[in-house]
Amino acid sequence: MSLPPCPKCHSGYTYEDGDMYVCPECAHEWARKAAAEAEEAQRVVRDAVGNVLQDGDTVTVIKDLKVKGSSSVVKVGTKVKNIRLADGDHDIDCKIDGIGAMGLKSEFVKKT
């Protein structure tokens, strides 16, 4: 696990001290909770073209995708409505007609 750089001097030599992060170069201290909130605020999910995705968007699949554990395939051009952004290797949670609930990677969809 890598620690965040110092928000004041951008040093990469930060260390943990209890519930705080400390920068040995400038002596700046900040709470770990604040760092986690800042990291979450910076997380941006983009589609294959570079558009920013948000909860509730409608996307189109740009590549045939095999459904793991099934013989089903999500075809190119399939529209997926009302997506939810999620943490993990699959950025999008959604329901696809005829298949059901599944996770998609944002690199295989385009915002419509």
Image (cartoon, rainbow, N blue to C red):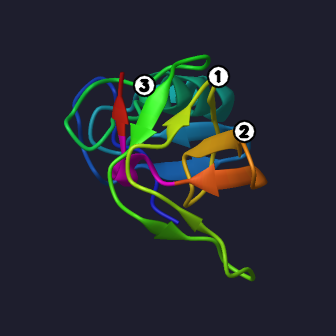
The structure residue drawn at horizontal position 34% and vertical position 52%, both measured from the top left corner, is: 107
Residue 77 falls left or right of residue 38: left
The structure residue drawn at horizontal position 57% and vertical position 56%, both measured from the top left corner, is: 90
Residue 58 at x, y percent in the picture: 50, 23
Mark sitting earlier along the chain (1/2): 2
Question: Mark 3, residues whose alpha carbon is within 10 Å: few (<14), some, or many (≥20)?
Answer: many
Circle 3 — which element?
loop
Residue 103 at x, y percent in the picture: 65, 53
Query: What residue range appears in magenta?
Result: 105-109
Q: Marks 3 and 2: in contact by CB < 8 Å?
A: no
Looking at numbered disc 3 in the image, what kind of residue is underneath it?
Leu
Above or below, 106 relative to 33: below
Looking at numbered disc 2 in the image, what kind of residue is underneath it?
Asp
Residue 15 at x, y percent in the picture: 49, 53
The structure residue drawn at horizontal position 45% and vertical position 31%, both measured from the top left corner, is: 59
Residue 14 falls left or right of residue 88: left
Q: As rendered, which of 108 and 35 lies closer to the eye?
A: 108
Name the residue tied to disc 3: 53
The total of numbered circles placed on residues is: 3
Name the residue tied to disc 1: 82
Residue 57 falls left or right of residue 112: right
Name the residue tied to disc 2: 19
Q: As rendered, which of 82 and 91 lies closer to the eye?
A: 82
Magenta stretch holds residue 10: no
Circle 1 — which element?
loop
Nearer the observer, disc 1 or disc 2? 1
Q: As rendered, which of 56 and 40 lies closer to the eye?
A: 56
